[in-house]
Amino acid sequence: MSKSDFILELKDLRTYFPVRKFLQKKFVKAVDGVSFQVRRGETVGLVGESGCGKSTIGRTIMRFHNPTGGRIIFDGDDITACDMKPYRKRMQMVFQDPYSSLDPRMTVGDIVGEPLDIQYPNMSKAERHDRILEQIHLVGLNSEQLSRFPHEFSGGQRQRISIARAMVIKPEFMVLDEPVSALDVSIQAQIINMLMDLQERMGQAFLFIAHDLAVVRHISKQVVVMYLGHVMEINESEDLYRHPLHPYTQALLSAIPVPDPNTSRARKREVLVGDVPSPIDPPKGCVFCTRCKYATEVCREQAPQIEDVGGGHLVACHHFREI
Ligand SMILES: Nc1ncnc2c1ncn2[C@@H]1O[C@H](COP(=O)(O)OP(=O)(O)OP(=O)(O)O)[C@@H](O)[C@H]1O
Ligand SMILES: [Mg+2]
């Protein structure tokens, strides 16, 4: 029996990077108090503009960065500061840039086999070969491609190789960092459908990172919207898409064309102006206040608490009821 309904829980997670600015030691507050959960076998989408801390969350969960504060709970175990060796078999990450994350001198067979070599060094050659072959077929590649090198593949195929590599040890949880952002729309749909099929077959949970809400809509049960290291809104994917409450989520959704006229009419058009402020000196109060057209004095003074508005829909905004 499993220890917890959640395969992953983040509690007030913080990851700061030390930097020097004008001879002063400062911190990039890449992730600054993030809490959410991922249920076993389900997908949570994590979205937000470039630089808002998505990859840093993924890397911190994997403990490639040590968190500055907060807790990471994996299957009921606190893994915030523990030795990660026993957990490496159970969680894997597909990195944002599939080209630089695949060793150009290794064949696809060896790339996909490497996690088996690390985690199961005593596995027989025959079993290793079978596992690699099975995984390669599952991601839609074929056995002739095993002896080829990464540069001989298209972007979509390289992404399939990265996914095969992460899945070959059958992890229970995977961070997929923008697995389709560099691909064109038809290939994006192919990869997302493939991931959904694999998930149904093997039952892993995914944290699926993207900057576009449309991409995560179908694959995610829940979506977490982030801005400048903070969570702005969390809701079930379809509800979030239909009834975004946070001005930032509304703005993100405005950028997506909607085929359904009812949804389109109901949705407020927002255009985000200005750049994301620096995470070294984030705005006081609500981090979104410098770009929010609803911002008032209270927003500039006081950070809003994230609030449950019913049914697990969470919003961090002083004014969402009035807009
Ligand atoms: N190792 C590091 N040292 C210092 N700052 C870093 C480091 N890694 C990330 N950052 C900073 O942390 C912030 C968040 O970066 P992160 O890569 O997590 O963003 P992201 O949401 O994944 O963006 P993108 O959509 O462009 O991938 C950025 O301001 C980035 O410059
Ligand atoms: Mg990133």
Image (tube, rainbow, N blue to C red):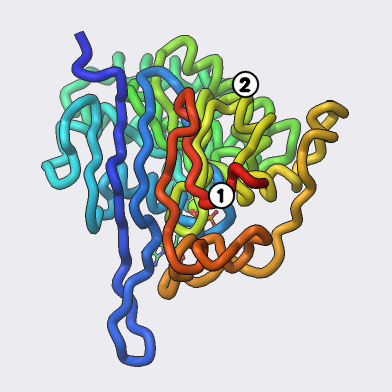
Q: Which residue is mark 1?
A: 48
Whether ligand 1 has any atom under 8 Å from the Cβ at mark 1 is answered as yes
Give residue 168's position: percent from left, percent from top: 37, 24
- In the displayed structure, does residue 274 sit left or right of residue 106? right
Q: CA distance from mark 1 to mark 2?
A: 22 Å
Q: Is residue 293 left or right of residue 281?
A: right
Residue 161 is at least partly visible in this image? no
What residue lies at 50% left-to-right and 47% top-to-bottom? 232
Coordinates of residue 67 in the picture (x, y in percent): 25, 53
Residue extending farthest right: 261
Q: Is 81 on the left-hand or right-hand side of 245?
A: left
In the picture of the structure, the residue carrying the numbered disc 2 is: 193
Q: How many marks overall?
A: 2
* Image: 205 above or below 161: above
Residue 101 in the image, given as x and y percentages of width and height? 45, 48
Q: Secondary structure at mark 1?
A: loop
